[in-house]
Image (cartoon, rainbow, N blue to C red):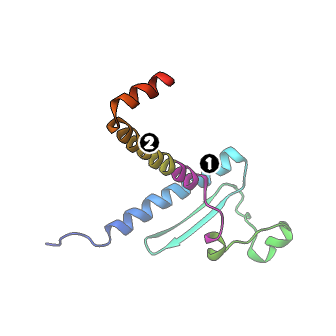
Amino acid sequence: MGGPDPYRNSRVKFIRRSQTLKAKAYELAKFCDADVYLFVNHQRGSFVYNSVHDRSWPPNDKNLEQHYPNLERLNFSKMESLPESPESNLSQLIRYFTTRSEHFRLLEDLYRRMDPANVIADKEAL
């Protein structure tokens, strides 16, 4: 009967990312006092989140520039060129320190293999 589902990873990834996106939209509205409208249309499902209870918001696309003169429009290619998120910077920093820690461990190992008399003399100098 069946076997492994080849689309399971794709489904799970969509569910997790959409849940994260919904949570972030909610947090942005709640903690930053922002009006958020999120619409996702996908073959696995569509959903809308609107932090404003008035159904007239957001205005239709023709009226956006009129209501929001400093509106920044982003498309997929512009989003790809945005600077990395702080999480990415944090993971890069963690990777950097992990690599440096490994280097120091290797140096300590080399130092221990040196002539013991030199090691004792170096420790006394400290």
In the image, what residue type sits under mark 1?
Answer: Glu
The image shows residue 96 at horizontal and vertical percentages of: 51, 50
Q: Residue at x 46, y 69 (%)?
A: 45
Residue beneath disc 1: 27
The single residue placed furthest to the top in the displayed view is 124
State the residue in front, 34 or 17.
17
Q: Residue at x 35, y 37 (%)?
A: 114
| Mark 1 or mark 2: whose residue is earlier in sequence | 1
Where residue 113 sits, quadrant-wise, is: top left
Q: Residue at x 32, y 67 (%)?
A: 8
Instruction: Characterize the local packing of mark 2: few (<14), some (14-19) or many (20 or more) Cα atoms within 10 angstroms.
Output: few
Residue beneath disc 2: 104
Q: Is residue 121 magenta?
A: no
The image shows residue 92 at horizontal and vertical percentages of: 53, 53
The image shows residue 19 at horizontal and vertical percentages of: 49, 56
Q: Residue at x 86, y 71 (%)?
A: 66
